[in-house]
Image (tube, rainbow, N blue to C red):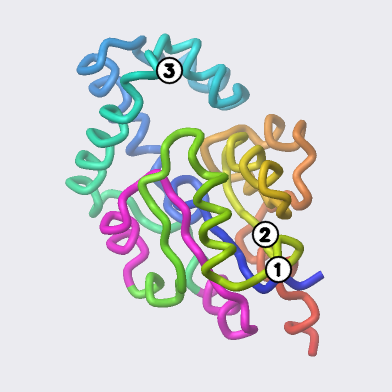
């Protein structure tokens, strides 16, 4: 079915920030006193859920808000290093040209998100940013309400296990991309409604009837 609202994650979904994250994570670990990530740990963490990652790295939950604020500051300073994945802007434009509203729900700040999106930011009708680690369901509900649509017309597209869990929590469809932070196998294990291997597959799923018309 075609959807009338597509809610996108930013990092790992639209923006190629994983290389920046790998370069930065151990500095953040040292600052906030959790375990450093060795090269050999990365693949295992990509197969883990968010809660498992926090447990393995021994991240105290009470420190998460401060860690997130610090990471947003670092990301703002590194914005020139973080590019959109190829094909993002044409894909988003195809959706808006076919009447799909776009929303961005991200753990990053809205200012960082708009800077990263560049000209593509103008295609989004709704921004709800600075999401806490497990705070996306509330933001999804708020965006759906603002957009004036019913959950059956909404799809969320992200790259992490928690994106799928958040979509399920609010009763909307979920799509998972295979080029982000989580390993594709970890995402497939949760049986998302759609699994995307390439950027141009998103428009085929989100607005198939309009595209064929």
Which residue reaches farthest left? 77
Q: Is residue 132 shown above or below 14?
A: above
The residue that disc 2 covers is: 155
Q: Is residue 131 left or right of residue 94?
A: left
Badge 2 vs badge 1, beta-carbon distance below 8 Å: yes
Check if residue 201 falls in the magenta segment: no
Q: Which label sits on residue 111?
A: none
Q: CA distance from mark 3 to mark 2?
A: 34 Å
Badge 3 vs badge 2, beta-carbon distance below 8 Å: no
Residue 20 place in picture, x, y as percent: 33, 38
Residue at figure coordinates x 36%, y 64% from the top left: 117
Q: Is residue 140 shown above or below 144?
A: above
Q: Which label sits on residue 39?
A: 3
The residue that disc 1 covers is: 206
Task: Give the quadrant of the C terminus.
Answer: bottom right
Highlighted range, magenta: 90-118
Task: Give the quadrant of the N terminus.
Answer: bottom right
Which callout, 3 or 2, points at the residue further toward the start of the chain? Answer: 3
């Amino acid at each position: 079915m075609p959807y009338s609202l597509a809610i996108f994650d930013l990092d790992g979904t639209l923006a190629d920030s994983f290389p920046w994250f790998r370069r930065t994570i151990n500095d953040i670990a040292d600052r906030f006193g959790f375990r450093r990530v060795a090269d050999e740990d990365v693949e295992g963490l990509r197969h883990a859920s968010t809660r498992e990652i926090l447990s393995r790295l021994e991240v105290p939950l009470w420190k998460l808000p401060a860690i997130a604020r610090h990471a947003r500051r670092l990301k703002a300073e590194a914005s020139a290093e973080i590019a959109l994945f190829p094909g993002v802007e044409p894909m988003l434009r195809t959706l808006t040209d076919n009447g799909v509203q776009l929303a961005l729900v991200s753990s990053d700040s809205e200012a960082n998100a708009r800077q990263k999106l560049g000209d593509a930011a103008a295609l989004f009708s709704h921004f709800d940013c600075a999401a806490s680690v497990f705070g996306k369901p509330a933001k999804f509900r708020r965006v759906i309400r603002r957009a004036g649509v019913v959950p059956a017309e909404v799809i969320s597209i992200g790259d992490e296990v928690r994106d799928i869990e958040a979509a399920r929590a609010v009763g909307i469809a979920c799509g998972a991309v295979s080029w982000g932070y989580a390993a594709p196998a970890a995402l497939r294990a949760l049986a998302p409604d759609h699994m995307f291997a390439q950027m141009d597959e998103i428009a085929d799923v989100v607005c198939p009837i309009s595209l064929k018309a």
